[in-house]
Amino acid sequence: MAHTSSRTTIVFIVVALISSFVLAFSVEEAEAKSLWDTCLLKISPKCALDIIGAVFENLTITDACCHDLVQEGKMCHNTLIKYIAEKPHLVAHETEYLKKSDELWTHCVSISETA
């Protein structure tokens, strides 16, 4: 009887841990989605695609889009790139993408300062 009771307790603990993990993940995902939606309002769709192309496909970005990126803000930029880089088919190269993201940010800040 004690053996069954301890198994039941372990099952409840595992279920509680999984439930709390799922809830925490859902909140984090919802917050990222909200920030994604908020940040995309600050930048044109073309520039958003150019920024994504510059980080994930080694494409170039215009000075005008650099200016928009800096206006968008570092937090939005980092969050959006990290959100995309964490997707299953990209996560293997996440470190590389985050480095490119930082390089793009530095480049765009320098462009915006001279404009």
Image: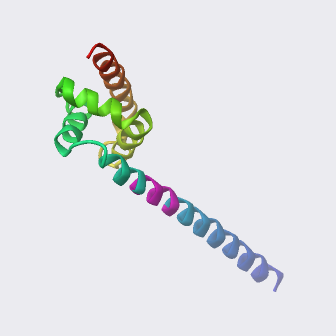
Farthest residue, direction top: 114
In the rendered view of the protein, which quadrant contains the N terminus? bottom right
Name the side, left or right, on which 58 lies relative to 29: left
The relative height of residue 75 versus residue 87 in the rendered view (above or below) is above
The stretch in magenta equals: 26-33
The relative height of residue 43 versus residue 55 in the rendered view (above or below) is below
Q: Residue at x 33, y 45 (%)?
A: 84
Name the side, left or right, on which 6 lies relative to 54: right
In this figure, what is the number of numbered marks?
Answer: 0
Name the side, left or right, on which 23 lies relative to 32: right
- The answer to whether residue 53 shows anywhere in this view is yes
Place residue 45 in its image quadrant: top left
Q: Main secondary structure of the magenta part?
A: helix
Residue 74 % position (x, y): 42, 33
User: Is 29 one of the magenta-colored residues?
Assistant: yes
Residue 63 % position (x, y): 20, 23
In the rendered view of the protein, which quadrant contains the C terminus? top left
User: Is 32 one of the magenta-colored residues?
Assistant: yes
